[in-house]
């Protein structure tokens, strides 16, 4: 079931010719006196990887949670160009949100406790997604869980171990398998490799890269780590204090940062 | 029905009850009266958990159950169910209580004074074994103080509020007739304040102590200081249909207010009151009330956890229900167990390395 | 006119034990429960003269339904003479004047713990099942407030997950009694701890079923002709207990749910769990004119 669209993968990104998959406009959110997001807009094109970079407190994770409909902004518009879906997604009711997130959007959290049921098996964590989407054949559940875990380069002989018994890198692979099990239109990654050993981090990034290449999944990846963003992203958005200070193609941002803050970030890293 | 005698359920339960009651012997008014006079603290505990203030009925319930507190509380609760709710008493304010005992651990002295009142707190816990040798124990007479303590005492929290020390939650003005009644509507969460206080008032003393003690030992978020503990009598003031308010009598009440510094930087209060004098219960209950806000779901101080698990009639009933036959459910599990053993499983679990 | 003339004479107890306000609340919640099949309705749940966990939920529903002309049957584990069933039945008749019966076909109201009788219930009969734990989500979510939200969201993924993992571990679904079932395509309920054998009897049944948990203060209903579908995977069929081929050593009946009685020699004998069906069969064999009603299972199979 792995959809390998080599033609698309080999093409140079033609960003302006296809309509965007994700469009966010004018999103603002305050928590009490704290401005988490201020008039943030973003677009992501099909098959593209958008990297969001910024220091902690810049609003990048809040923005990702908004994309996963975990929170509603004070103002703003959010659309996904998917069949049977129209209007501002922030206006969806609780039930429709839950179904949309469960079936069309995948997410990998930095903290695996947020994304996984630790007391259930790894394969069960993946199967739960399919069960929510209405899959009722045990053989299909088993097969698709195996397939998703395999695609996430998870060792299949451990597919019925509980995540709590696994290493941090393995837990991220279970999260990833769960996120891609339903072949989502959008994959959200919130600091997916932060806290892992450098070598494990590289392996997980490899898997992500391979998945992106093989399946042309549209991704949004949030990280404070410029190295991760540089490895993964086609396009980069730099955030600071709830605002987008600069965005552009990854090469542009890293070679020729315009905003003073971006310059600081890039130079600090280099 | 020829088969009744051979299987004999009805006869068995009848004889079983007789055996229990034969052990207790005849119950007369004198025995009930003696229980009421001899065991006032037990009567208070039972009345509080039953949420029914009637010392004679409580003594009767204890006589009938042979001192099994859970049985006595159930008897009183079931009797209470059958009684109409005639009227709703006027609210009682703290400074109107006829106070026997009022202490604060938060201050050396408080306005109105520390009134020790009746207490075994500083007694040496020595068994008076002489009584068994035929020497009656006669308590020494009480020597009245030179100046009597005032019967009514201000509330310490009122002084703290004036000082700006204590968080003052918004007051909900509810007509007495509209106060939610836990016995007539289900307890849902997050619980209404009235339901929480009613649940605490009716809670099992032992259960409340266990959870309250867990909170005090560190499973809670807040370390309590006893702001004010009171044993008092409250007037039950009711409104006659003609409009006059009159006192229908007095009930013994206990209340505790414990405090700790909250996130706001102000003192937060936990409160518990119950019918009858029962210090352990109100201090534990107030500690749990103090710890409940913001407690994680499933923590031993979280509201739902505390209130569900300290309900004496529900908890004791469910505990003893495990004596009932469960052979149908057992048979059903047995079938699944044998099936799992016998059938060559169509989907063998993958071997998980240890 | 005197006040006495305006009031009813004092009675020590209300008819049917519960007072009018308690019964009114129960009737409202029972109607709501019928309106939303399988959805748990919270109710006040009064204390009754029986310990919580001993059928007080079923008792309150039955007390609300009873009238002097009612004919009431009470069973525990399928048996009318079980001690707790005997105690509940005598309380019910004492406070309502209803007639007691052991015969499923003669009853108008049947209160039961852990079984549904083998004889088919009719449209003019009401079944009241005692429920210890009304929450099918309890194994995955002990907190009732969260579980309520999950029902509202039809969020049953984790419940299915338990079944998935049972098959992964044991090769089959290990749920014994109280098999979670989807009612009317919307709410998952626990059918009370009845064996899997009995769950199909609720599906598109002619009779009305109330399920009531006194201690947990929740009641729910399966109205007549309502779908009740056990949660099963499409490729692993629902399995009732393997009792179809067992024979009752007392009555000689075969093809019904049995109690297993261990024997001294290490073997086991079986007897009908529905004790009065057994009694009727024995009487019939002895030549008495006893009617056995049509049963749900025929030759150990539930007709589709």
Image (cartoon, coloured by chain):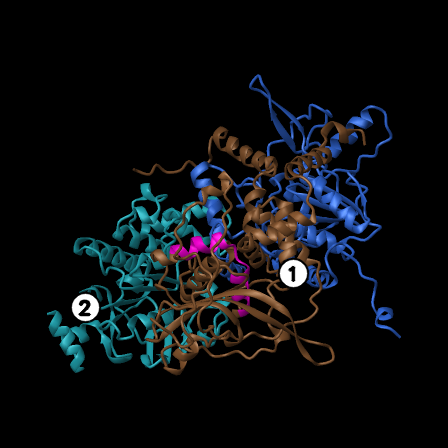
Q: Main secondary structure of the magenta part?
A: helix
Q: Which quarter of the figure has residue A16? A: bottom left
Judging by colour alone, the chain drawn in blue in this rendered image is: C
The reply to whether the magenta stretch includes residue B209 is yes
Shade representing chain A: cyan
Q: Which residue is mark 1?
A: C36
Along the line of sight, the residue nearer the viewer: C281 or B41 = B41
Left or right, residue C127 beside residue B59: right
Give the position of the C terminus of chain B as an image quadrant.
top left
Which residue lies most toward the top here? C265
Point out which mark residue A226 bears: 2
Along the line of sight, the residue nearer the viewer: C125 or C263 = C263
Crowding around mark 2 (Cα neighbors within 10 Å: few <14, some 14 to 19, many 20+) is many
- Measured in 3D between alpha carbons, the distance from the residue under mark 2 to the one under mark 1, in whole angstroms, is 54 Å
Q: Secondary structure at mark 1?
A: loop
Please give the chain letter of the residue carrying mark 2.
A
Left or right, residue B264 beside residue B84: left
Along the line of sight, the residue nearer the viewer: B35 or C144 = B35
The reply to whether the magenta stretch includes residue A99 is no
Mark 2 vs mark 1, foreground winner is 1
Question: Where does residue B65 sit, x and y in percent of width and height?
Answer: 62, 45
Shade representing chain B: brown
Question: Where does residue B46 sit, x and y in percent of width and height?
Answer: 57, 54
Instruction: Specify start and end residues of the magenta stretch as a single range.
Output: B194-214
């Amino acid at each position: 079931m792995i959809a390998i669209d080599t033609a698309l993968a080999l093409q140079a990104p033609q960003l302006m010719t296809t309509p965007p998959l994700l469009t966010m406009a004018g999103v603002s959110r305050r928590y009490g006196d704290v401005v988490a997001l201020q008039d943030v807009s973003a677009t992501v094109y099909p098959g593209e990887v958008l990297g969001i970079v910024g220091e902690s407190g810049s609003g990048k994770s809040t923005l990702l949670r908004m994309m996963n409909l975990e929170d509603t902004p004070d103002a703003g518009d959010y659309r996904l160009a998917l069949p049977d879906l129209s209007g501002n997604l922030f206006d969806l009711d609780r039930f429709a949100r839950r179904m949309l997130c469960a079936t069309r959007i995948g997410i990998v959290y930095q903290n695996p406790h947020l994304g996984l049921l630790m007391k259930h098996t790894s394969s069960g964590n993946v199967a739960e997604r399919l069960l929510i989407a209405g899959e009722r054949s045990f053989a299909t559940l088993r097969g698709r869980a195996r397939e998703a875990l395999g695609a996430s380069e998870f060792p299949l002989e451990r597919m019925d171990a509980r995540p709590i018994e696994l290493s941090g890198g393995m837990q991220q692979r279970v999260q990833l398998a769960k996120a891609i099990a339903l072949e989502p239109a959008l994959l959200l990654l919130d600091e997916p490799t932060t806290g892992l050993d450098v070598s494990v981090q590289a392996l997980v990034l490899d898997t992500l890269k391979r998945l992106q290449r093989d399946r042309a999944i549209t991704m949004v990846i949030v990280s404070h780590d410029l190295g991760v963003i540089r490895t993964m992203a086609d396009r980069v958005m730099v955030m600071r204090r709830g605002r987008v200070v600069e965005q552009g193609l990854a090469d542009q941002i890293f070679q020729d940062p315009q905003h003073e803050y971006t310059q600081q970030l890039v130079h600090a890293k280099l | 029905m020829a088969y009744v005698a051979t299987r004999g359920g009805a006869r068995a339960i009848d004889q079983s009850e007789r055996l229990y009651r034969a052990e207790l012997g005849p119950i007369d008014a004198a025995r009930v009266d003696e229980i009421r006079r001899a065991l006032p603290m037990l009567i208070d505990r039972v009345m509080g958990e039953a949420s029914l203030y009637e010392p004679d009925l409580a003594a009767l319930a204890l006589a009938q159950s042979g001192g099994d507190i859970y049985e006595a509380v159930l008897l009183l609760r079931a009797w209470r169910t059958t009684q109409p709710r005639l009227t709703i008493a006027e609210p009682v304010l703290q400074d109107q209580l006829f106070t026997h005992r009022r202490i604060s651990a938060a201050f050396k002295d408080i306005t109105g004074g520390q009134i020790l009142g009746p207490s075994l707190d500083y007694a040496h816990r020595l068994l008076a074994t002489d009584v068994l040798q035929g020497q009656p124990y006669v308590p020494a007479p009480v020597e009245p103080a030179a100046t009597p303590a005032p019967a009514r005492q201000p509330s310490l929290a009122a002084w703290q509020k004036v000082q700006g020390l204590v968080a003052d939650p918004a007051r909900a003005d509810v007509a007495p007739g509209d106060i939610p009644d836990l016995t007539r509507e289900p307890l849902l969460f997050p619980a209404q304040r009235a339901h929480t206080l009613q649940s605490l008032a009716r809670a099992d003393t032992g259960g409340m102590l266990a959870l309250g003690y867990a909170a005090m030992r560190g499973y809670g978020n807040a370390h309590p200081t006893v702001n004010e503990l009171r044993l008092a009598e409250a007037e039950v003031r009711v409104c006659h249909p003609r409009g006059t308010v009159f006192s229908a009598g007095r009930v013994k009440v206990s209340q505790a207010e414990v405090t700790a510094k909250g996130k706001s930087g102000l003192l937060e209060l936990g409160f518990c009151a119950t019918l009858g004098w029962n210090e352990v219960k109100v201090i534990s209950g107030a500690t749990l009330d103090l710890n409940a806000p913001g407690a994680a779901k499933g923590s031993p101080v979280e509201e739902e956890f505390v209130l569900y698990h300290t309900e004496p009639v529900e908890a004791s009933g469910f505990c003893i229900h495990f004596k009932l036959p469960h052979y149908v459910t057992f048979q059903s599990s047995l079938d699944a167990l044998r099936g799992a053993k016998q059938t060559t499983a169509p989907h063998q679990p993958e071997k998980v390395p240890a | 006119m005197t006040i006495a003339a305006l009031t009813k004479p004092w009675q020590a107890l209300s008819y049917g034990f519960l007072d009018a306000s308690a019964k009114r609340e129960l009737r409202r919640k029972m109607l709501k429960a019928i309106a939303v099949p399988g959805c748990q309705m919270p109710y006040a749940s009064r204390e009754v003269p029986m310990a919580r966990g001993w059928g007080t939920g079923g008792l309150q529903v039955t007390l609300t339904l009873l009238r002097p002309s009612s004919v009431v049957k009470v069973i525990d584990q399928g048996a009318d003479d079980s001690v707790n069933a005997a105690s509940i039945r005598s309380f019910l008749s004492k406070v309502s004047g209803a007639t007691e019966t052991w015969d499923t076909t003669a009853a108008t109201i049947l209160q039961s713990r852990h079984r549904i009788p083998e004889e088919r219930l009719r449209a003019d009969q009401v079944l009241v099942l005692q429920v210890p734990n009304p929450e099918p989500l309890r194994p995955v979510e002990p907190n009732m407030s969260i579980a309520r939200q999950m029902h509202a969201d039809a969020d049953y993924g984790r419940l299915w997950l338990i079944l998935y993992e049972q098959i992964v571990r044991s090769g089959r679904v290990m749920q014994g009694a109280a098999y979670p079932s989807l009612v009317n395509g919307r709410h998952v309920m626990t059918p009370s701890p009845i064996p899997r054998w009995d769950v199909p009897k609720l599906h598109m049944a002619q009779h009305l079923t109330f399920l009531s948990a006194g201690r947990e203060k929740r009641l729910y209903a399966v109205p007549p002709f309502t779908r009740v579908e056990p949660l099963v995977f499409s490729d692993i069929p629902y399995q009732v207990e393997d009792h179809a081929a067992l024979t009752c050593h007392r009555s000689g009946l075969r093809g019904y749910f049995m109690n297993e009685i261990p024997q001294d020699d290490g073997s086991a004998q079986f007897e009908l769990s529905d004790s009065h069906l057994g009694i009727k069969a024995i009487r019939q064999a002895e030549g008495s004119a006893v009617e056995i009603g049509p049963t749900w299972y025929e030759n150990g199979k539930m007709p589709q």
